[in-house]
Image (cartoon, rainbow, N blue to C red):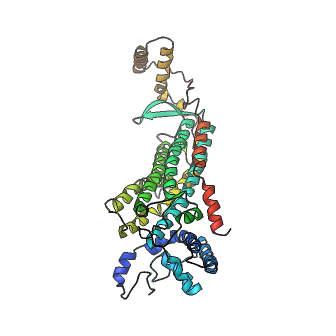
């Protein structure tokens, strides 16, 4: 069994080790390349304050870049008996470079190591989510523009209400993603603060240069107070989880609409055949399984903030092992959300719409408000016009005028998609992903 970084003159029993390590070895594979990046920044700082020589730094950086490449290519493995990713990286350096490999831990704790790993992972994972949200947004806006003149019923209380359009329907989900993007931006900025150098939560007697590691890792700022840097664990994940849940909420509503509109009772849309499944006994079935799974996964993701909150909610100041469990629900959530976003974007682009929905006379009452407004515009008091049209509907004599003339901002005839696109573009520009990319390229020697 490998020696633990913290081990002294006694050995933990296997049962206790199994329970306390839990799924850390598995989940730490998410963090491997970020642990290496944190170590590269840390040792560069250690050399700058005289705790490593230039030759030692050169050798350690070269070895760490090799390990980083292994992690990038999926070849990084945490060996049996090795407790976590931090121990594995240090073990690999020690095997390769001898005693020099043990020097990388000066001035830090596994507490701030995992903090910086999680921040770097989250920052990177959020960028991927942003890119997938933008891809879905682009498809929704494109379909909105393509189908802006195709009318469909609008509903309140699941009752036929007023004329809508596919332009409005697709565009509404697109604009919803803009608000989600604002929350993603706040989550990203929360994650983009450097905790490295807080050590076990109370700083270090070494003269650490925390601004240097902040710059090397491309963070927007540092988490200044060492105690708060540790308190931020769990809080960051909770705030990010709320942003992910917001995106998931938009996906869930889109998926529910699509399942409903795809049913024979509605017949508003037809999903691509390759996105449906059949029945084992009913040969006519084409089930919207992909959207049903998107809906279920998205609803599961909307529970993530509560899961994180309940794990970390009643902890006092300082580090506690409870926080380890957050990784189990938090780290895999990004993959699940990006999968849903990709599937939704694919189906939105491929789905077909029914262009003649309102030809069915059952939808005639949908034009009642148009007639009330026409009468009111001609001078009839609104309440009198409302009663007149209502009586015509009751008598079965209502003859709708199907000409729709909506011109105000955000209506059928004026979708404002150009403004929605500009809003999304401005939000994405404020992430400043390029700053992070430049800093990490330099750190990796690229």
The tally of labels here is 0
- Seen from the viewer's position, the closer of residues 323 and 179 is 323
In percent of the image, x 61 and y 40: which residue is there? 422
- Seen from the viewer's position, the closer of residues 129 and 369 is 129
The quadrant the N terminus occupies is bottom left
Estimate the x, y position of residue 171 in percent, counting from the top left.
Answer: 55, 39
Image height of 20 relative to 323, above or below: below
In percent of the image, x 52 and y 45: which residue is there? 177
Estimate the x, y position of residue 278 in percent, counting from the top left.
Answer: 50, 55
Q: Quadrant of residue 385?
A: top left
- Seen from the viewer's position, the closer of residues 185 and 173 is 185
Q: Quadrant of residue 46?
A: bottom right
Q: Can the viewer see residue 402 in this picture?
A: yes
Estimate the x, y position of residue 261 in percent, counting from the top left.
Answer: 49, 42
Q: Can the viewer see residue 285 in this picture?
A: no
In percent of the image, x 46 and y 45: which residue is there? 253
Left or right of 35? Residue 3 is: left
Image height of 14 relative to 118, above or below: below
Left or right of 421? Residue 389 is: left
- Seen from the viewer's position, the closer of residues 180 and 362 is 180
The quadrant the C terminus occupies is bottom right
**Residue at the right extreme of this rendering:** 446
Estimate the x, y position of residue 92 in percent, counting from the top left.
Answer: 55, 82
């Amino acid at each position: 069994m490998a020696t633990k970084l913290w081990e002294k003159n006694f050995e933990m029993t296997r049962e206790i080790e199994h329970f306390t390590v839990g799924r850390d070895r598995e989940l730490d594979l998410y963090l491997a390349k970020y642990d290496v990046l944190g170590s590269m920044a840390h040792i560069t700082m250690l050399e700058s304050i005289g705790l490593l020589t230039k030759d030692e730094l050169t050798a350690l950086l070269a070895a760490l870049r090799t390990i980083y490449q292994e992690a990038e290519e999926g070849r990084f493995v945490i060996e049996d008996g090795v407790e976590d990713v931090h121990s594995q990286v240090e073990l690999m350096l020690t095997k390769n470079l001898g005693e020099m490999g043990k020097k990388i831990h000066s001035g830090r704790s596994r507490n701030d190591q995992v903090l910086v790993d999680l921040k770097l992972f989250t920052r990177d994972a959020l960028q991927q989510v942003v890119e997938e949200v933008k891809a879905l947004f682009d498809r929704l806006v494109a379909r909105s523009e393509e189908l802006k003149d195709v009318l469909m019923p609008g509903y309140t209380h699941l009752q036929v209400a007023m004329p809508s359009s596919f332009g409005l329907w697709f565009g509404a989900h697109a604009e919803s993603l803009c608000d989600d993007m604002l929350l993603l931006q706040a989550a990203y900025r929360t994650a983009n603060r450097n905790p490295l150098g807080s050590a076990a939560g109370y700083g270090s007697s070494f003269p650490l240069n925390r601004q240097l590691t902040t710059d090397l890792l491309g963070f927007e700022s540092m988490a200044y107070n060492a105690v708060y840097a540790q308190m931020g664990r769990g809080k960051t994940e909770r705030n990010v989880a709320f942003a992910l849940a917001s995106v998931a909420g938009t996906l869930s509503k889109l998926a529910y609409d699509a399942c409903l509109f795809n049913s024979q009772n509605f017949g508003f849309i037809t999903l691509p055949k390759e996105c449906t499944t059949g029945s084992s006994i009913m040969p006519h079935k084409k089930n919207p399984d992909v959207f049903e799974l998107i809906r279920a996964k998205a609803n599961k993701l909307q529970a993530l903030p509560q899961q994180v909150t309940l794990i970390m909610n009643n902890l006092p100041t300082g580090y506690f092992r409870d926080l380890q469990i957050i990784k189990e629900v938090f780290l895999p959530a990004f993959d699940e959300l990006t999968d849903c976003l990709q599937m939704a974007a694919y189906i939105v682009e491929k789905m077909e719409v029914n262009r003649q929905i309102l030809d069915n006379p059952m939808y005639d009452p949908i034009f009642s408000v148009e007639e009330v407004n026409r009468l009111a515009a001609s001078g009839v008091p609104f309440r009198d016009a409302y009663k007149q049209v209502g009586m015509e509907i009751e008598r079965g004599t209502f003859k709708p005028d199907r000409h729709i003339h909506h011109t105000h901002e955000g209506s059928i005839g004026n979708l404002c998609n150009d403004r929605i696109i500009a809003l999304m573009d401005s939000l994405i520009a404020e992430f400043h992903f390029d700053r992070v990319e430049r800093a990490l390229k330099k750190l990796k020697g690229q």
